[in-house]
């Protein structure tokens, strides 16, 4: 049986911490920013932990 290939696109989008949590950029800061308040766009910066529901699917794509 050949090795499982990891999904390289997902590897570029997420980071796995030492404890196994998955961090990703917060969504909603790419376009249509004029309609969003400065406070809202400021809070969208940085990385957040991926939801518990999405974590198993992402781990499978990463080959973990």
Image (cartoon, rainbow, N blue to C red):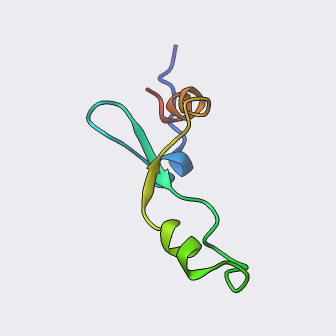
Residue in the image at 60% along x and 30% along y: 57
Relative to 3, residue 32 above or below: below
Residue in the image at 60% along x and 71% along y: 29
Q: Which residue is more in the foreground, 18 or 11?
A: 18
Image quadrant containing the C terminus:
top left
Residue in the image at 64% along x and 65% along y: 28
Q: Which residue is more in the foreground, 11 or 17?
A: 17
Q: Which residue is more in the foreground, 6 or 48?
A: 48
Q: Which residue is more in the foreground, 23 or 62?
A: 23
Place residue 19 in its image quadrant: top left
Q: Is residue 40 left or right of residue 49?
A: right
Relative to 18, residue 46 above or below: below
Q: Position of residue 22 (x, y in %)?
A: 43, 40
Q: Position of residue 5 (x, y in %)?
A: 51, 33
Find the residue positioned furthest to the top: 1
Relative to 15, residue 55 above or below: above
Q: Position of residue 33 (x, y in %)?
A: 67, 81
Find the residue positioned furthest to the bottom: 34
């Amino acid at each position: 049986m050949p090795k499982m290939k990891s999904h390289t696109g997902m590897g570029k989008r997420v980071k796995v911490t030492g404890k196994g949590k998955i961090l990703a950029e917060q969504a909603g800061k790419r376009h249509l920013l004029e309609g969003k308040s400065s406070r809202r766009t400021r809070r969208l910066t940085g990385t957040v932990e991926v939801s518990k529901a999405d974590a198993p699917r992402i781990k499978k794509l990463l080959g973990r």
